[in-house]
Amino acid sequence: MTPPVAMTLWRDYEELDRPGVCAGTTAVSGPAAEASQALFEDGVRRVALDDLVDLSSASDVPTLVLVRELTAYGIAVDWRVRLDAGGWRDLSHLFPPGEVAGDEEAHRGWRDGYHFFKCVYRRGPGFLQVRDRRSGVLRRITIDGPAHRAAVDDLLEGCPVSALPPAVLRDLATMRLVHLLDGTAWWLPCRVRQWPSGKSVL
């Protein structure tokens, strides 16, 4: 069983000392989307994760999934990460970490290049649509095949690579929509309920 993700909570985007701003601590387990929605509805606007996230360990996939869901709700995430050889750019749509262990250049690039809606998706009737600006150029991707949509459902919380049809996994990985970590794969884009307005994000 995956251990819960321990964190400290604030009801403000800053770590302020005013009464009522610090909302204590919690440990999140279970579906990340449900946990993030509950935190948001409780007024939480910033969290700090206790433990370093290691991008060489599949055991940290649940934490990465949680960071994705918190990012989708606009919750600031104070977290620390150690990169693997694959780097950070595929993760650059996630709220930037406060520390990238041993790589200040990656930390600075992630922080300076981040913006909300950098890589997002929404569901429509019989399709998913992704808008991805991680490369600096907008890519619009529509996923409408039943096997691909079923794979996305499996990938939302992370799943073994062996549980996915190889051709489908290859397609999604080629489009940089999944992250592979030591035999585990998880879905990268953040979900939005409606597209934002404005040319800067579309």
Image (cartoon, rainbow, N blue to C red):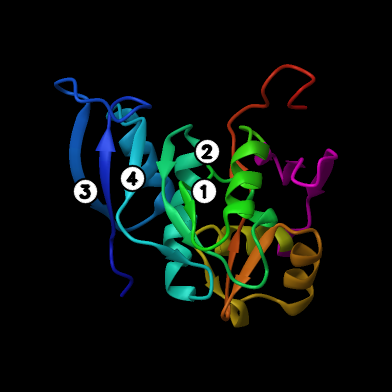
Q: Earlier in the sequence, mark 4 or mark 1?
A: 4
Q: Which residue is mark 1?
A: 68
Res 185 label:
none
Q: Tell me where residue 20 appears, x and y as whole percent.
A: 16, 23
Magenta segment includes 143: yes
Label pair 1/3, CB-CB below 8 angstroms: no
Percent position of residue 126, x then y: 72, 46
From this viewpoint, is residue 90 visible?
A: yes
Amino acid type of the residue that numbered disc 3 sits on in the rendered structure: Thr
How far separated are the C-alphas under marks 4 and 2?
A: 16 Å
Residue 91 vs 119, above or below: the answer is below
- Disc 4 marks which amino acid? Ala
Query: Can you identify the residue that label 4 sits on?
Result: 48
Amino acid under disc 2? Ala
Q: Which residues are magenta?
A: 118-147
| Amino acid under disc 1 | Arg
Q: Nearer the viewer, mark 4 or mark 1?
A: 4
CA gap between label 2 and label 3 equals 19 Å
Residue appearing at x 52%, y 66% in the figure:
158
Element on which disc 4 rests: strand
Residue shown at 38% from the left, 45% from the top: 34
Q: CA distance from mark 4 to mark 1?
A: 14 Å
Residue 23: say if magenta. no
Q: Earlier in the sequence, mark 1 or mark 3?
A: 3
Question: In the image, which disc is placed on residue 26?
Answer: 3
Horizontal and vertical percent for residue 200? 76, 22
As drawn, is 71 to the left or to the right of 24? right
